[in-house]
Amino acid sequence: MATTADTDAMRRAIALAARALGATSPNPVVGCVILDAAGQPAGEGFHRRAGGPHAEIHALRAAGDRARGGTAYVTLEPCDHTGRTGPCSQALAEAGIARVVYAVGDPTPQATGGAGTLRAAGVQVEAGLLAEEAEAGNAAWLTSVRLGRPYVLWKYAATLDGRIAAADTTSRWITSAESRADVHRLRAEADAVVVGSGTARADDPHLAVRGVDGAVQPLRVVVDTEATAVRPGARVLDGAAPTLIAVADDADTTHLKAAGPGDEPVDVVRLPRAERGLSVPALLAELHARGVRSVLLEGGPTLAGAFVAAGAVDKVVGYLAPVLLGAGPAALGDAGITTIARALRLRMTETVRIGPDLRITATPGHSPADSTTTAVPTSHKER
């Protein structure tokens, strides 16, 4: 039976892990808290970046000799392999930790087994404390391991009657400055931000993170099937963050050969066409191969519809402004849903006031992060 101290320590570990969202891919976010033998805080830490020390190592260093006889609370099962860093299971045992409590088992074949190693070393091991909260905090990485593709969060901003722009296509600004600042937080937590050609033409978006201290800039991705929306001088090519242009495999990209910063070639990936635009699974597979584990989909209704139709939206965050337009494009385009019986039902998980607006968070009734399907790319060995 978990005590209040156990729960408090694990909740602190989950909060620590969240500090590194957007900075650890292709690794997970992990937090660790160590209480000494008397149950007093001795050390804590979180995994800050891929290739760097894991959360347990940061916490053990902070705890020093006070770790001996203590309890370590970890959001993910301590790893049991040597990659760019050594096995955390061995480090915990050698430090004299008497008890390890972890929230979620490690699903990767290369890293799992830490619990067994710890038990063999005489360490008491308990699993599952606040597992649901820890899973939610690591949803992007867990989705990437289980499904072999990045986790996708679709964000949109709309009026109360569901319009993302007026009939004359003007859209700046429907939502408040507070909501726009909150979107930069979402960008900072993502590995990639994706828009379509319609958004690129209409808004010439920048897509880089602003106003978030220490943010790792996400990969800016424009899905430009015909290679006609992104032209030399576009803001997305300014060098503030890496940029990838996804085009059809037969598109002419001559104009992009010297359009990057310092007249460098733009990073272009050619993908197969789908019935409308590019293949969403092929795009996600390409991003996954590049180490992207979380995608913020900021594209317009056409691209959003394609992702929904492909079953590739894991979370929806909608910013609703107390504004009415009555005409103009809707937030979601054709998603292949032709009857109410096939409607994609969502489970609302949060509603929050952001300035004058309302931010609604919802997930599909069946979340991919809960799937038992396993697809583990070799890149997970980097842990």
Image: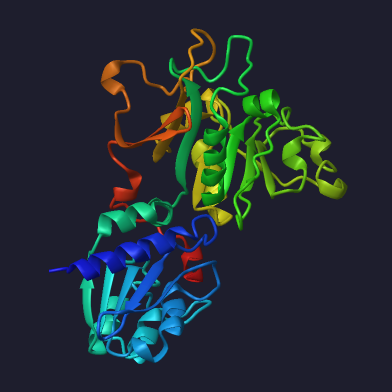
Q: Is residue 314 above or below residue 377?
A: above
Location of residue 7 (image quadrant): bottom left
Colour convention of the picture:
rainbow
Position of residue 149 in the picture relative to residue 300 (left or right): left
The picture places residue 242, in percent across and down from the top left corner, at 69, 50
Q: Residue furthest left?
A: 1
The answer to whether residue 101 is visible is yes
The picture places residue 21, in percent across and down from the top left corner, at 49, 56
194 or 206, nearer to the observer: 206
355 or 268, nearer to the observer: 355
Position of residue 252 in the picture relative to residue 329 (left or right): right
State the quadrant of the N terminus. bottom left
The answer to whether residue 104 is visible is no
Location of residue 364 (image quadrant): top left
Q: Number of numbered discs present?
A: 0
The picture places residue 238, in percent across and down from the top left corner, at 77, 43
Could you tell me which residue is drawn at 52 percent across and 62 percent down?
24
Position of residue 111 in the picture relative to residue 239 (left or right): left
Could you tell me which residue is drawn at 82 percent across and 35 percent down?
232
Could you tell me which residue is drawn at 35 percent across and 81 percent down?
89
Location of residue 375 (image quadrant): bottom left
The picture places residue 45, in percent across and down from the top left corner, at 44, 72
